[in-house]
Image (cartoon, rainbow, N blue to C red):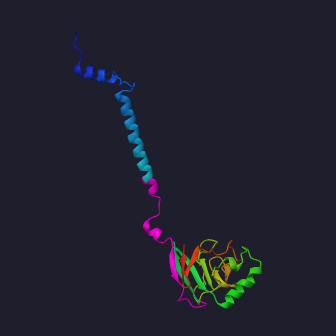
Amino acid sequence: MAQPDSTTTAMGEGEGRKHPDGTTRRDFLYLASAAFAGTGAALTGWAFIHSMNPAADVLALASTEVNLQPIAPGQAITVTWRGKPVFVRHRTAEEIAKAKADDSAALPDPQPDSRRVQREQWLVLLGVCTHLGCVPLGQKPADSKGDYGGWFCPCHGSHYDTSGRIRRGPAPRNLEVPTYSFVNDSNIRIG
């Protein structure tokens, strides 16, 4: 009579033996492998999703504070916020009066001046033309301010008034007003 191989006997006995609750070692290995694979997939997914979060340098630019004290009436400055130019203009009494008078004009994107400013002497706008994303002229004293005394986009001829509203040209909307708040009388926080 041939004697069975000792390795075959050991394997055969281990596979056939059942725990009192009806499970085998193979069931345990399947469950352990599935748990290990599931954990690995979850960690890989978390790393992938986490990589889509903005970098620290981008988060640092989420808001910017601007000191308004050095800006004289009639003067404008450009600051960068989220990589885009923001126009901050200290409007004169004449510019404010013209913007209010133009509230009743036929505007392509109607919006009263009072909804575009928090304090009428300070106008804060995203300096990006709403037509094709150019940066309009009008911040420097020597710049052309267009037919309405605000900004002029020379690329395609959009004219904006002293409230940043589109008056003439291909731009479909007014210059955007970013989210901002007055920290105190002389500082604003954009973003």
So how many labels did they put on this image?
0
Q: Where is 75 relative to 160, above or below?
A: below
Q: Residue furthest top?
A: 1
Direction front: furthest residue: 20
The residue shown at (65%, 84%) is: 120
Q: Percent x, y for residue 123?
A: 62, 82
Q: Is residue 75 left or right of residue 47?
A: right
Q: Is residue 65 above or below residue 45?
A: below
Q: Quadrant of residue 73?
A: bottom right
Identify the residue at image location x=40%, y=40%: 35
Q: Could you say where residue 158 lies in the image, as x and y percent from the top left?
A: 67, 78
**Residue 30 coordinates in the image, percent (x, y):** 39, 33
Front-most of 12 and 131?
12
Q: If the image is split into quadrants, where does the C terminus sit?
A: bottom right
Does the magenta portion include 62?
Answer: yes
Q: Is residue 181 left or right of residue 53?
A: right
Task: Choose between 175 and 24: the one closer to the eye.
Answer: 24
Question: In this picture, which residue range is highlighted in magenta?
Answer: 47-74
Q: Which corner quadrant holds the N terminus?
A: top left
Give x and y (percent) for residue 185: 56, 84
Image height check: is 160 above or below 172? below
Query: Can residue 169 be found in the magenta stretch?
Result: no
**Toward which corner of the image does residue 86 lie, by quadrant?**
bottom right
